[in-house]
Image: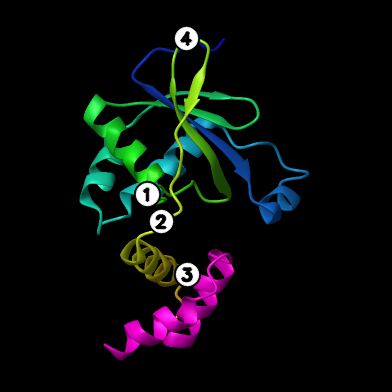
Amino acid sequence: MARPVQLAPGSLALVLCRLEAQEEAAAGAEEPSGRAVFRAFRRANARCFWNSRLARAASRLAFQGWLRRGVLLVHAPPASLQVLRDAWCRRALRPPRGFRIRAVGDVFPVQMNPIAQSQFIPLAEVLCCAVSDMNAAQTVVTQETLLEHLVKHHPGHRVWHLIIQSFWMD
């Protein structure tokens, strides 16, 4: 029998949803365990070597629980939780593989206060993430493949080709 999880201040809740392709693939399979999702989340953010504060904060996370409907509860020292909040606000917090993060919030005994995201995405963060993802997929990074990746994974930004051209020229 599982031990009860105490929801206390000093915890964050991450509301996750499966990516569409993952939903279809998992239709017949059982849902991953909360610990597996937690490990994937921690791994995804620990890989951000260009953001040492985020990588260090991810390594200090502790699993607190997994609620149905995809809510991951994590605990860490206050400074590490603040790094995660800041990363979420800057759109730099990476989801576990196969998921998207819908919301992040501080957990109090029965409620979660969502943290608002800005519209700003740091270009350096986007480029580093894209190159890291492409390297992990063993995709050769060229101007064309990088542009395709950015258009696919950040579809709301129509100026990628201008940014990449100016970046590549420098």
Q: Earlier in the sequence, mark 2 or mark 4?
A: 4
Query: Is residue 149 rendered to the left or right of residue 48?
Result: right
What percent of the width, then of the height, locates residue 165? 40, 87
How far separated are the C-alphas under marks 3 and 4?
Answer: 41 Å
Residue at left offset 32%, top offset 41%: 86
How far separated are the C-alphas under marks 3 and 1?
Answer: 25 Å
Tell me: residue 50, above or below residue 65: below
Q: Nearer the viewer, residue 89 or 79?
A: 89
How far separated are the C-alphas under marks 3 and 2?
Answer: 27 Å
Q: Earlier in the sequence, mark 3 or mark 2?
A: 2
Magenta part of the protein: which range? 143-170
From the image, state whether disc 1 or disc 4 is nearer to you: 1
Q: Secondary structure at mark 1?
A: loop
Return the residue at label 3: 137
From the image, state whether disc 3 or disc 1 is nearer to you: 1
Q: Earlier in the sequence, mark 1 or mark 4?
A: 1
Q: Earlier in the sequence, mark 3 or mark 1?
A: 1
Return the residue at label 4: 109
From the image, state whether disc 2 or disc 4 is nearer to you: 2
Task: For residue 97, say whether it is visible.
Answer: yes
How far separated are the C-alphas under marks 2 and 4?
Answer: 32 Å
- Asked whether the beta carbons under mark 2 and mark 1 sit within 8 Å of each other, the answer is yes
- Asked whether the beta carbons under mark 1 and mark 4 sit within 8 Å of each other, the answer is no
